[in-house]
Image (cartoon, rainbow, N blue to C red):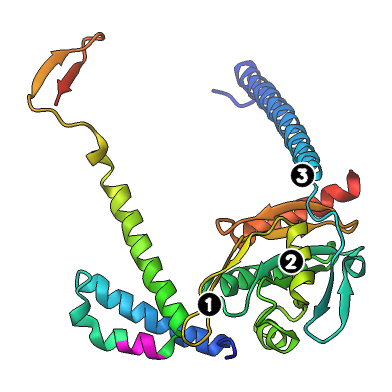
Amino acid sequence: MTAPNSAERKTCWDARDHLWKCLDDNDDNAASCQRFQSEFEAKCPAQWVKYFTKRRDFLKYKCIASTNQDDDLPRHESLEVLPGDHGSQWVRL
Amino acid sequence: MVPGSPKDLKLRTRLLVTLLFGGGLLGVWWFVHSEKQQKLRQQRVEQLRQVALGQGTFSLMDHTGCRRTKRDFLGNWVLLYFGFTHCPDICPEELEKLSTVVVTLDRDASLPPVQPLFITVDPERDDEAALARYVKDFHPRLIGLTGTVEEVKHAGRDYRVYASAGPKDEDGDYIVDHTILIYLVSPDGLFLDYYNRMKSAEQIADSVRKHIKNYATL
């Protein structure tokens, strides 16, 4: 099979972008975006559908990982206010 | 205050002296800074020379059916990219960027024309016809290169390019995972610099311009 040419690439990318916009607007509810999903699968080679789907998952994961950085801090039970060495207020969580 | 009075002159003299002094300081700073930049550039070229990429030769077929070796490109500045025509998005984007770089550099009449090259990492599917179809969507000077599996592997090894074909699906289609870099090669065939996805066309054009200008003086 021949590789998609420039016009076919653009058609595929546009279909992908429409699907992703729909998923963004519908909180990744795939059921609401069935129409876009079918169009995406029709306009792109199967390998590209797989590739772009994986890429979206990766991008989403990256986004979640960076916004949840605070979750990495240790959490403790008590909440106390302690004076620090420089007289500043430190809160022990 | 009467214009031209002693107080006025004194103020003006002081202002002038301050400006000259400040200007002098700025000049010295700028000179030291550009010397440092030059030194850093030379160090980097030295380091890249030691890494010794692209030292070998390659013998490949271009998209018009002509055999091309590395020797054919000596004397030219070359921007080289490895990819494959079935690539979903990265290769077209990088080649688009590469084309923009060449167009930008072409506008500067003081620079020699840069030769863009595209070497496939997927010789099984990317024959001359496939490459011819592919390269016409990018810069008119872009040359596509392919060959036997061995020839292509040899060229890739020379630039330590990583390439790994993924599993084939029921259409026989597959993605080739590969190093995504644009390589800058000098007219004497030396690998001078590389640019990743993060670099914009403007940044690459600037860097190439600097290399070309430095090359003349080094």
Query: For the point 60% across and 68% down, which residue is it?
Result: B94
Quadrant of the rendering where the C terminus of chain B is positioned: top right
**Which segment is the magenta one?**
A38-42
Residue type pointed to by label 2: Lys
Gap in angstroms between the C-alphas marked 3 and 1: 32 Å
- Let me know if residue A30 appears in the view: yes
Question: Marks 3 and 1: same chain?
Answer: yes
Q: Is residue A42 above or below residue B74?
A: below
Classify mark 2: residues with Cα within 10 Å, few (<14), some (14-19) or many (20+). Answer: many
Query: For the point 53% across and 73% down, which residue is it?
Result: B175
Residue bearing the label numbered 2: B153
Residue bearing the label numbered 3: B51
In-image side of A89 versus B182 (left or right) = left
Q: Chain of mark 1?
A: B
Nearer to us in this view, B111 or B124? B124
Gap in angstroms between the C-alphas marked 3 and 2: 19 Å
- Return the disc, 2 or 1, that comes first in the chain's sequence: 2
Q: Position of residue B129 (x, y in %)?
A: 72, 89
Gap in angstroms between the C-alphas marked 2 and 1: 18 Å
Q: Looking at the rendering, which quadrant does residue B29 occupy?
A: top right
Q: Chain of mark 3?
A: B
Say whether marks 3 and 1 touch (CB < 8 Å): no
Residue type pointed to by label 3: Val
Q: In what element is the residue under mark 1?
A: loop
Residue type pointed to by label 1: Tyr
Query: For the point 60% across and 16% down, which residue is it?
Result: B7
Q: Position of residue B142 (x, y in %)?
A: 75, 76
Q: Looking at the rendering, which quadrant does residue B60 occupy?
A: bottom right
Residue B174 is marked as 1
In-image side of B133 versus B75 (left or right) = left
